[in-house]
Amino acid sequence: MKTVADPKTVTVETSIIVRTFNEEKHLGNLFDGFDRQTYRDFEVIVVDSGSFDRTRDIATERADKLIRINSHDFTFGYSLNQGIREARGKYIVIVSAHMIAATDRWLENLIAPFRDEKIAMVYGRQQGMACSKFSEAEDYRRTFGNKRKTESFPNFAANNANSAIRRELWEQKPFDEILLGLEDIDWAKHWMEKGLEVTYEPDAPLYHIHEETWRQVRHRFYREAVAYRRMGIKSRRTIAKELLKEAARTLGDFYQAFTNKDNPVAERLSIGQRLREIIYFRLNMNYGTLKGLLNNHPLDTEESLD
């Protein structure tokens, strides 16, 4: 008679946490990428916040565990904490549901830096696809380059769309469940201030598929601006600096629109369409950011209003 091991006693080295909400379009591709990985010592936990499409059916079939939370309880930090509490791995990999592994060694390369005990968090490369917004694909190229680097204040790029952390450190500091976003940067900042390191691994790439409406773009950058204020990284005093930075990026986008160099979105858009999309993206992005930095919010502290 075959003895079946108790799942609670079986250990794995790595637990992958995937947060979902109506992701049936992309979730299968994400799991296909997991199946292709050369590194196999992992489990997959899906944390779903009220999907009403086939997301939960796909997760039930392909994930090791499905955790359901109420959509009204959702924050990025809360959903992650719920998933990690059920995880068995000593390394926690966090991936957005609308991602596709770009190589079969993505996972192996993402956790390899943990051989260095000083490393608290690793984040991997993100790349756009033809369906991306033109400017967002440019921002991925600017933010996630070909060279490894160690995160440094105040130029944070750590991102839980493609990241890994040590479980033992999470047990000391779970993700902030109040922040509207940027729980990744908050966590990274905490451990950097404790003397540990956060590193970028370019050889752990994922394709990031954002198919947002302009309203969703505005809201995403609004949430991030509120979170930046909460953490004291950005404030009303930094608005001029942010606008100058965005002006430079916009000009860079226009240049790329004409030169058609290394942007996967260029294949589906004419030059006129690229220019229009650049303008729409940057206007909506900056509208959301300015609203988040200027308007009062319940998360504001007296310091963040300065």
Image (cartoon, helix red, strand yellow):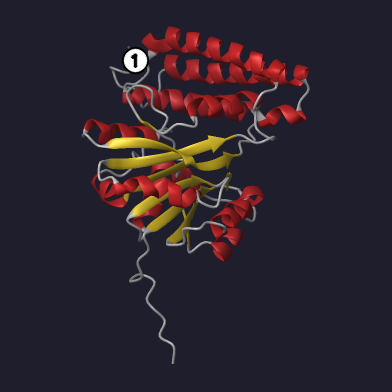
Q: Residue at x 60, y 48 (%)?
A: 22
Q: Is residue 18 visible?
A: no
Q: Residue at x 30, y 31 (%)?
A: 189
Q: Is residue 266 left or right of residue 2?
A: right
Which element is circle 1 on?
loop
Specify the quadrant that holds the N terminus: bottom left
Could you tell me the amino acid type at mark 1?
Leu
Q: How many marks overall?
A: 1
Front residue of this view, candidates 260 and 176 = 260
Quadrant of res 238: top left
Specify the quadrant that holds the C terminus: top left
Q: Position of residue 209 (x, y in %)?
A: 61, 39
Q: Position of residue 201 (x, y in %)?
A: 43, 39
Q: Residue at x 49, y 12 (%)?
A: 245
Most extreme residue toward the bottom is 1
Question: Looking at the image, is 76 positioned above or below residue 41?
Answer: above
Q: Is residue 203 left or right of residue 112?
A: right
Q: Is residue 39 left or right of residue 249?
A: left
Q: Position of residue 160 (x, y in %)?
A: 44, 40
Q: Position of residue 114 (x, y in %)?
A: 32, 47
Front residue of this view, candidates 152 and 202 = 202
Q: Is residue 85 visible?
A: yes
Quadrant of res 264: top right
Front residue of this view, candidates 121 and 110 = 110
Question: Looking at the image, is 274 positioned above or below residue 129?
Answer: above
Q: Which residue is mark 1?
A: 305
